[in-house]
Amino acid sequence: MKELWDVLDKDGKITGRTMERGWMKSGDFHLIINVWIKNTKGEYLIAKRTDNKRWLNLWGCTIGSAITGDDSLTTALKETNEELGITFISENGELFKKIIHYVDDDKDRGEFIDVWLFT
């Protein structure tokens, strides 16, 4: 089954269109989340990426793309559960930062990256 994303405009608003994963054209943006997990000692949990995905075997935070219909928080909760088997409640999360990443330095297409911090 192909993964579908909501297409966002340059201001991060949903356009009503969808795209298949990886098929961005000029004017297309989509939502990605990063989840950082901190314990009560101030230590951060990182995980080793699988060897069959992009950036194989690297260590880092949980990353995922929002699929059609999912907002930022829903995606953060879902990806954390899928990748780490950890279930958080939304009240333990904080939208820490929003970043825009342009694909290939093309200011007309890219990704809105929402960075979440869960304690």
Image (spheres, rainbow, N blue to C red):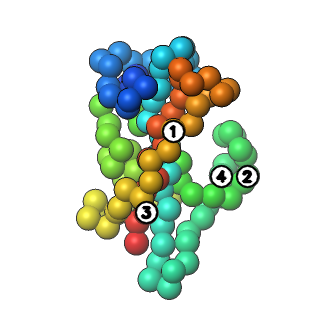
Q: How far is mark 2 from mark 1, CA to CA?
A: 25 Å
- The spot of residue 93 in percent (x, y) is 34, 62
The residue positioned 55% from the left and 78% from the top of the image is 43
Q: Quadrant of the C terminus?
A: bottom left
Going from N to C along the chain, the mark reached first, 4 or 1, is 4
Q: Is residue 91 left or right of residue 82?
A: left
What whole-number distance in Å separates the C-alpha atoms at marks 1 and 3?
18 Å
Give the residue at x 68% y 39%: 54
Task: Evaluate if marks 2 and 4 touch, with contact meaning CB atoms under 8 Å apart.
Answer: yes
Q: Residues within 10 Å of mark 3 (few under 14, many from 20)?
A: some
Is 47 above or below relative to 115?
A: below
**Could you tell me which secondary element the residue under label 3 belongs to?**
strand
Q: Is residue 115 above or below residue 45?
A: above
Q: Which residue is mark 1?
A: 100
At a point 56% along the width and 37% down the height, the residue shown is 101
Residue shown at 65% from the left, 52% from the top: 49
Q: Secondary structure at mark 4?
A: loop
Real-space CA distance between mark 2 and mark 4, rounded to the nearest whole angstrom:
5 Å
Q: Is residue 25 visible?
A: yes
Residue 7: horizontal and vertical position, in percent? 40, 22
Outermost residue to the bottom: 41
Sequence order check, earlier mark of 3 and 4: 4
Alpha carbon of mark 3 to alpha carbon of mark 2: how far? 23 Å
**Label 3, label 4: how many angstroms apart (C-alpha)?**
19 Å
Q: How far apart are the two marked residues, 4 and 1, measured between alpha carbons?
A: 23 Å
Mark 2: few, some, or many residues within 10 Å (few <14, many ≥20)?
few
Q: Position of residue 31 (x, y in %)?
A: 44, 36
The image quarter containing residue 105 is top right
Mark before the other along the chain sequence, 3 or 2: 2
> Which amino acid type corresponds to the residue marked 3 in the rendered image?
Leu
Mark linked to residue 49: 4
